[in-house]
Image (cartoon, rainbow, N blue to C red):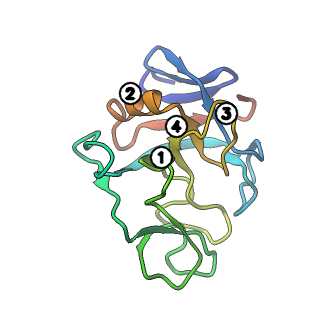
Amino acid sequence: MAPSDLVLTPRGVRFMGRILPCTIGKGGLSAQKREGDGATPIGVHRIGGMLYRPDRLPSPAPWAMPIGPRDLWSDDANDANYNRHVRAPYGFSHEKLRRADPLYDLVLIMDWNWPNAVPGNGSAIFIHQWRRPGFPTEGCIAFARTDLHWLAARVQPGTKVIVPPLART
């Protein structure tokens, strides 16, 4: 493991010599991730993209893509675009990327089951802002806003996200 890897530990995520408090999925960690189980997938993942709300913050990195009013993420295992960025109007089940709350103001896309998704193996596994300390996610990894912005300014496409089987936060 390199200092530039994000590594989930019992105390938070270790990155560049810091430990950043975080929350994980309400279903804990899973080596058998399934759609809707609320678990954070175990494994070595990579950052595949970054999205941000341009109406709420400046671009956090040159490679970040803006989230617009019609941007969605398909979470329907029957959809050919399952676990992909799609646009409204959209006939399959999906999650809005442009939310009223600040959770998705800045999103790092992990490559879990993406971009070549296996239907039912889980969708929308992101790194995003937490609701509050200790409040679990639906399977994502979430941070305080300031820590998330600090991370976003330093990660690159391909940065490793290591979720070992025994890490707990």
Tag 4–tag 3 contact (CB < 8 Å): no
Q: Quadrant of residue 11?
A: top right
Between marks 1 and 4 in the image, the one whose residue lies nearer the viewer: 1
Residue with the mark numbered 3: 164
Q: Position of residue 99 (x, y in %)?
A: 48, 58
Distance from Cα at disc 3 to Cα at disc 1:
28 Å
Which element carries disc 4, helix, strand or loop? strand
Amino acid beneath label 2? Trp
Discs 1, 2 touching: Cβ within 8 Å: no
N-terminal label among 1 and 2: 1
Q: Earlier in the sequence, mark 3 or mark 2?
A: 2
- Taking depth in this image into account, of 104 and 43 the one nearest to the observer is 104
Helix, strand or loop for disc 3: loop
Tag 4 and tag 2, C-beta contact below 8 Å? no
Q: Amino acid at mark 4?
A: Val
Q: CA distance from mark 4 to mark 2?
A: 16 Å
How busy is the neighbourhood of tag 4: few (under 14 within 10 Å), some, or many (20 plus)?
many
Mark with earlier residue (4, 2): 2
Please state which of residues 165 and 132 is positioned toward the viewer in this rendering. 132
Residue contact between numbered discs 1 and 4, judged by CB atoms under 8 Å: no
Camera-nearest label, 4 or 2:
2
Residue 136: x percent and y percent? 70, 41
Vertical position of residue 111 compared to residue 97: above or below: above
**Residue type, mark 1 in image:** Pro
